[in-house]
Image (spheres, grey):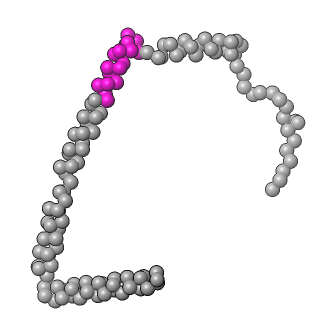
């Protein structure tokens, strides 16, 4: 889809205008704004450094406190596994004998299928 445009009828006039002397005063105005905004009124460099240091120390302390809170909230390694296993065994013991037999049968079938699939994978890799 190729189209040829003729830009000769558009001309070279810019649709934007700038006030007279704008570019002559631009550097002075920028430097003046930088001097005014670089330092807050009445604050020395030393005060800024102290304020930034205090903020950094508070941030580090907050991170350490958060770490301790998260660590206490997480379950401890082996205890959680033991509790989970005990809960599963307790739930299994509360089932009827027929349900227990059914679950054991399904588990044994799943183990058989897993072993069979692993043997197939080993045979294919050889």
Residue 43, placed above or below residue 79:
above
Q: Is residue 53 left or right of residue 103?
A: right
Question: Residue placed at 27% from the left, 39% from the top?
Answer: 63
Residue 98 seen = yes
Q: Is residue 7 left or right of residue 56?
A: right
The range drawn in magenta is 40-56
Task: Label the magenta part by its dominant secondary structure.
Answer: helix
Question: Residue placed at 18% from the left, 65% from the top?
Answer: 81
Question: Residue placed at 64% from the left, 15% from the top?
Answer: 26
| Position of the N terminus by quadrant | bottom right
Q: Position of residue 52 (x, y in %)?
A: 34, 24
User: Depth check: 6 or 41 in front?
Assistant: 41
Q: Is residue 51 left or right of residue 87?
A: right
Q: Is residue 97 left or right of residue 102?
A: left
Q: Position of residue 94 (x, y in %)?
A: 11, 79
Q: Position of residue 37 (x, y in %)?
A: 47, 16
64 in the magenta segment = no
Residue 58, placed above or below residue 30:
below
């Amino acid at each position: 889809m190729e189209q040829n445009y003729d830009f000769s009828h558009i001309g070279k006039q810019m649709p934007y205008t700038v006030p007279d002397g704008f570019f002559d005063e631009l550097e002075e105005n920028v430097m003046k704004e930088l001097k005014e905004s670089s330092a807050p009124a009445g604050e020395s460099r030393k005060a800024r450094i102290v304020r930034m240091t205090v903020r950094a120390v508070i941030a580090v302390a907050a991170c350490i406190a958060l770490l301790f809170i998260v660590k206490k909230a997480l379950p401890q390694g082996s205890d959680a596994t033991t509790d989970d296993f005990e809960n599963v065994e307790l739930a299994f013991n509360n089932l009827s004998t027929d349900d227990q037999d059914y679950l054991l049968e399904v588990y044994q079938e799943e183990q058989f299928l897993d072993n069979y699939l692993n043997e197939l994978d080993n045979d294919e890799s050889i």
